[in-house]
């Protein structure tokens, strides 16, 4: 779902490295010789030239600002600047505090939170079952931006899961059944065979039932940090923090040192 927010003037400008793709392509061969060797990691750096964020121009809630940024990210994806704009790194932890991270696709957001879908028997889901604390990171590197969400996750209603499952491509619906996510399998052939059996049972055009072990999580944010790259590593970091829940929730904004 796309949030339609008012659009404050944030004086956001992309640097030449991002917007002038044609010039970058033309100069690629000449700049290759000057590039540092792959082993010299300390010499690899990007220079950010974007304008920043101004507190006085921020919307009242982080969902509004996220909606504005996400709209711009979709435009960047349409222009070929950025791949998979809804990709985010989801970090969870087990009861011992040992973290794990993986990339997942955002499938919806509104004032209630951010939604993704997964196998409820996967590692992330098992960890969330015992420790609902979660972090989401949107790494929009070509735009010199990041959004970091921390909060708690809970399962969405079953009807919401089924409604989303119906919108998935047929192959993805079969894949949700074929893969026992995060479990050990002997070979790739085992996975392919399970998928082929399901494809025979549910041919294209036949409705695939939504698995009971598969569904969505909604992340209710406690804090949302917006990171904008700036020159000289003096980046802008503005963090919304929530006090209260539901209709009584209020947001305050702090600027963090880079």
Image: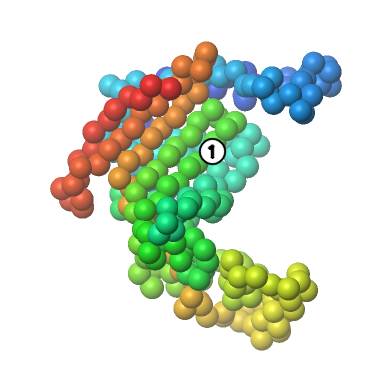
Which residue lies under the disc numbered 1? 139
What residue is drawn where x is 51% and y is 18%? 233
Secondary structure of the residue carrying tag 1 is: strand
Horizontal side of 151 relative to 100 (left or right) equals left
Q: Position of residue 207 (x, y in %)?
A: 56, 80
Label 1 neighbour load within 10 Å: few <14, some 14-19, many 20+: some
Query: Which residue is farthest bottom?
Result: 201
Figure quadrant of residue 174: bottom right
Query: Which residue is farthest left?
Result: 248
Figure quadrant of residue 252: top left
What residue is drawn where x is 60% and y is 31%? 142
Res. 217 visible in picture? no
What kind of colouring is applied to the model shown?
rainbow
Res. 238 visible in picture? yes
Horizontal side of 145 relative to 221 (left or right) equals right
Q: How many marks?
A: 1
Q: Position of residue 55 (x, y in %)?
A: 30, 23
What residue is drawn where x is 67% and y is 81%? 198
Query: Which residue is farthest top?
Result: 232
Quarter of the image where the C terminus is located: top left
Q: Does residue 16 sit above or below 196 in this rendering?
A: above
Q: Position of residue 36 (x, y in %)?
A: 76, 20
What residue is drawn where x is 60% and y is 18%? 47
Q: Does residue 236 sit above or below 6 in this rendering?
A: above
160 or 215, which is in the foreground? Answer: 215
118 or 37, which is in the foreground? Answer: 37
116 or 4, which is in the foreground? Answer: 116
Figure quadrant of residue 192: bottom right
Q: Does residue 74 sit above or below 22 in this rendering?
A: below
Q: Position of residue 153 (x, y in %)?
A: 36, 57
């Amino acid at each position: 779902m796309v949030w339609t927010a008012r659009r404050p003037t944030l004086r956001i400008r992309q640097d030449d490295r991002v917007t002038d793709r044609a010039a970058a392509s033309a100069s690629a061969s000449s700049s290759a010789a000057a590039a540092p060797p792959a082993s010299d990691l300390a010499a690899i750096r990007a220079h950010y030239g974007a304008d920043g964020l101004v507190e006085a121009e921020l919307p009242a809630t982080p969902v509004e600002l996220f909606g504005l940024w996400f709209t711009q990210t979709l435009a960047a994806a349409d222009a070929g600047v950025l791949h998979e704009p809804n990709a985010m790194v989801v970090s969870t932890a087990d009861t011992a505090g040992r973290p794990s991270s993986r990339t997942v696709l955002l499938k919806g957001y509104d004032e209630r939170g951010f939604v993704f879908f997964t196998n409820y028997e996967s590692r992330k889901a098992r960890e969330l079952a015992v420790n609902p604390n979660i972090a989401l990171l949107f790494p929009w590197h070509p735009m010199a931006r990041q959004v970091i969400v921390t909060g708690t996750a809970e399962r969405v209603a079953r009807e919401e899961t089924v409604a989303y499952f119906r919108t998935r491509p047929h192959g993805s619906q079969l894949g949700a059944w074929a893969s026992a996510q995060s479990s050990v399998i002997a070979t790739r052939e085992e996975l392919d065979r399970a998928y082929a059996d399901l494809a025979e049972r549910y041919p294209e055009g036949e409705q695939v039932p939504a698995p009971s072990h598969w569904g969505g999580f909604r992340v209710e944010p406690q804090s949302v940090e917006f990171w904008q790259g700036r020159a000289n590593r003096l980046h802008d970091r503005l963090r919304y923090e929530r006090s209260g829940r539901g209709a009584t929730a209020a947001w305050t904004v702090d600027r963090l040192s880079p």
